[in-house]
Each structure stands twice: as structure tokens, then as C-alpha cells.
Image: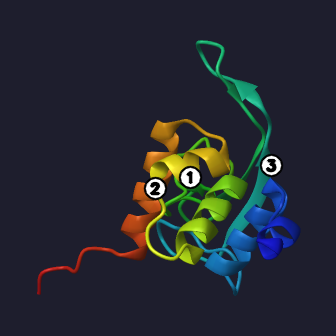
Amino acid sequence: MIWISSELGTEQQCLDFAERFRWPRGARCVRCGSARVFKFLAKASTRKGAAIVPARRLYECVACGHQFSVTTGTLFHDTHLPLVKWFFATALIINTKGAITARQLQRDLQVSYQTAWYVRHRIRETLDPTPEND
């Protein structure tokens, strides 16, 4: 766990790692595949109903105008859980001899049981996808 805490201990470090891993030769549009994209920081805002949306790092494609983030189309897509916890959960699941329970993830991540179950389910589904019919 030393690697996780020292190399991926902050949300910024996790985002940087995810960008390097997903796009080793630079960001590409997730919709059209164009390499003509630019990165920008969206300011924090408030949605109707007083939900606060924190500042976030986004990309926009010059060719098609699509906005996306590094997590778009990944198992981390559309989650409110910090990437630090996702990466920690992934490391726990991969490094545990046998299966790790949602209860154990709940304790280790300090999240609700429902969140732990959801995280465990998505990670396991990604690591062991069902074979497609030929």
C-alpha cells in the first residue's frame, strides 16, 4: 500500500495518473477520436436544489465540440467517490488473496455498505468481463 499512498495519495495525482495511463500520447476525443482537444478547468458551481458541483478538469474537442473528462467511458464515470478511494479499492481487490467482501471494503474505504458494494461490483465486472458470444 506504500505505492498507493505515496504516488496516488491525492485526487490531483490520481487524475494525472489516469490521464497518462489513458492517453500516453496525449488526450483524444472520446467521441470522434480527434487529437485536437484542449484542457480547461470548469469553475465550481451550484445546481438547482443547492447541489454543489466542485471545480473539475475537463477537455473539449475542437473538431466536434464534445466536452469530456478523463473518467468518461471508464468504470470511474459518473461517480461522486474520489478517485483516491477508487484506486485504493482496486488495489485492495487485486492484492487480496481470494475475494474481498463489501463489508471489508466498507471498513477500509470508510464509505457506506451500498457504496462499497457498488465499487466492488464495478471493479470486479471490469476485471472479469463476461465473454462475448461469437
Label whose residue precedes the other's in the sequence (2 or 3): 3
Apparent side of residue 13 relative to residue 62 in the rendered image (left or right) = right
Q: Which residue is mark 1?
A: 105
- Marks 2, 3: nearer the viewer: 2
Split into 4 quadrants, where in the image is the N terminus? bottom right
Q: Which residue is mark 3?
A: 41
Residue 84: x %, y % from top left: 72, 56
Instruction: Examine the rendering and report whether any part of residue 61 can be seen.
Output: no
Q: Quadrant of residue 59?
A: bottom right
Disc 1 versus disc 2: distance between alpha carbons?
6 Å
Whether residues under marks 1 and 2 lie with C-beta atoms below 8 angstroms apart, the answer is: yes
Q: Secondary structure beneath disc 1?
A: helix
Amino acid at the residue labelled 1: Leu
Disc 2 versus disc 3: distance between alpha carbons?
37 Å
Residue at 44% from the left image edge and 67% from the top image edge: 99
Residue closest to the eye, 70 or 128:
128
Q: Which residue is mark 2?
A: 101
- Marks 1, 3: nearer the viewer: 1
Apparent side of residue 105 relative to residue 101 in the rendered image (left or right) = right
Apparent side of residue 33 relative to residue 124 in the rendered image (left or right) = right
Amino acid at the residue labelled 3: Leu
Residue 119: x %, y % from top left: 49, 53
Residue 90: x %, y % from top left: 58, 66
